[in-house]
Image: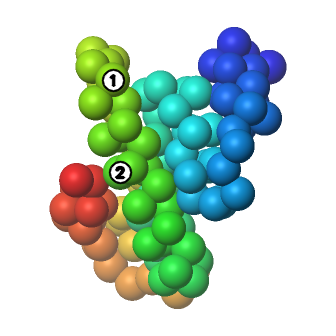
Amino acid sequence: MTLAALLALATLACSTSTDPASATRSYRMGFSHFLAMETNLVRAVAPAALYANLRAIANGAASALESRGTTTKLFASVQVEAAWGKMPGMSGYVGLAQDRADAR
C-alpha cells in the first residue's frame, strides 16, 4: 500500500462526518492530486446519480485542495475505449468534451 493510500485511509478513519460525500471527499484529499478515474466510462455505464456524485465529490475535493493552497496538479483519468466509442453498446467516437466541461 502506498503512503498516499495510507494517508487517505487514516483521513477517512478520523473523519467525524456521517455524510458519505463528505467522508469520501476527505478520503480523496488524502491522495491530493488524483481526483477521479475513468470518468467517461462511469458516465456511460453507471446510473446517472452515481456519475453526478462522482463529479460533485471530485470537484469538491479539488476546491478544498485549492483552498489549502496546493500547488500539485489535479487530474482525473478517462477510458480511451469509451472515448472512441469502442465499449459494448457504444457506436462511434464520443470524445472527452463532456468530461472536460464537468471538471469545474
- x and y percentages locating residue 54 in the rendered image: 49, 61
Q: Does 33 sit above or below residue 53?
A: above
Q: Can you tell which mark lies on residue 20? A: none
Tell me the residue at 28%/30% (across/down). Answer: 66
Tell me the residue at 52%/80% (across/down). Answer: 49
Q: Does 64 sit above or below residue 39?
A: above
Nearer to the camera, 101 or 24: 24
Left or right: 12, with 98 as reference point: right
Q: Does 84 sit above or below residue 80?
A: below
Left or right: 99, with 52 as reference point: left
Amino acid type, label 2: Asn
Residue 41 is at least partly visible in this image: no
Tell me the residue at 39%/49% (across/down). Answer: 60
The residue that mark 1 highlights is: 68
The residue that mark 2 highlights is: 59
**Residue 64: which quarter of the image?**
top left
- x and y percentages locating residue 35 in the rendered image: 46, 41
